[in-house]
Image (cartoon, rainbow, N blue to C red):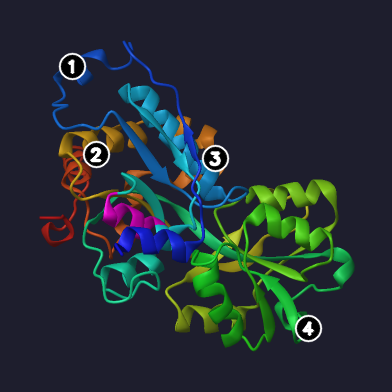
Amino acid sequence: MSFTISLKRISGFHPSVLVGALVGGLTFSTVTLAQTDRENWPESFTVGTASQGGTYFVYGSGWANLIADQLGLSGGGEVTGGPTQNLALVHNGEVAFGLTTMGPARDALSGKSPLAPGIVMDNVCAMFPMYETPFSITALSDSGITSISEIPDGATIGFGPAGSTSDTYFPAILEELGVKFERRNGGWNDLAGQLQDGLIDVIAFAAGIPIPAVSQLEVQTDVNIIEFTDEEQAKAVEAFPVSEFTIPASTYSTLSEDSDVVSMWNFAIAGCDLPESLVYEATRITMENNDKMRSIHRSAETTVPENIEYNEVIPFHPGAARWYKENGYEIPEDMIHQ
């Protein structure tokens, strides 16, 4: 049995593709595209995102449509299990691009991916920084849960899709903080529905903000968005590849003041064997059109070249590295895929 087949069976996902329209004869950057070496470019591409209701799906599908439209290709976002599966799909060449967080990327590149233990996923290259993923907790207001310490022993907590960043790290973080719980997996929209129906007690989200499922919950019911104490932040930062992060009060109508949590950086990835000119153009469009990126999702405010410094794990694709170098951003040679 091939690794590709077993991967899909392990993940339990049946991907659906949202394909953008095939665009021909574009007037955008006509000279640039005419001068670009398009030899060996695919006629279409797919971006591995995550479950519907999460930020990855919105961000990745919107970005795919932007690139497809600007480059005259057919492309779209694919529903997946999130970062861990995206790394495997990109490595295998099943999708051209994907979205991932630094923790799962570090595991995959060192042969420690839970989906394929022992396989070093070295056909994965970085393209551009996306945003930080805050780890935040949501409960219904009538639950009475207002802090992590108030989560009752044996509470059922939804951690997102199996193998996602949230599912990989949030249970371990909560265990480190002394929380005893029953684990539940599922898409964010599905878990939000279960929370409303009283089938689970808490959702532990790891997604770019604002998280669509949380925003929708706020419209439908009263919720508590729970922050970390200073001590809880310090414990999590010491034990895991996360850093301190503050969710601005303006993010959600529920918040009356900023909420302190922890976070992990996200980067877009590409197959290292993709044509250099294709990855260069995709990187150029992304980095030179932050207004369009922010219109896809607010979290793209940090999708800017200055933030490439937060990638110390994934080698950059030569096409992406060329754009950064041409525009005055330094990347160490040992961080560029050879």
169 horizontally vs 178: left or right: left
Q: Quadrant of residue 111?
A: bottom left
**Relative to 189, is 148 above or below?**
below
Earlier in the chain: of badge 4 and badge 3, it is 4
Q: Which mark is residue 152?
A: 4
Q: Which mark is residue 300?
A: none
Q: Which residue is mark 1?
A: 34
Q: Nearer the viewer, residue 114 or 338?
A: 114
Label 3, residues with CA under 10 Å away: few <14, some 14-19, many ≥20: many
Q: Which residue is mark 3?
A: 297
Earlier in the chain: of badge 1 and badge 4, it is 1
Q: Can you give x and y, in whole percent of width and height, for residue 331 in the image?
A: 19, 54
Mark 1 in CB contact with mark 3 (< 8 angstroms): no
Q: Which residue is mark 2?
A: 279
**Labels 1, 3: front one:** 1
Mark 1 in CB contact with mark 2 (< 8 angstroms): no
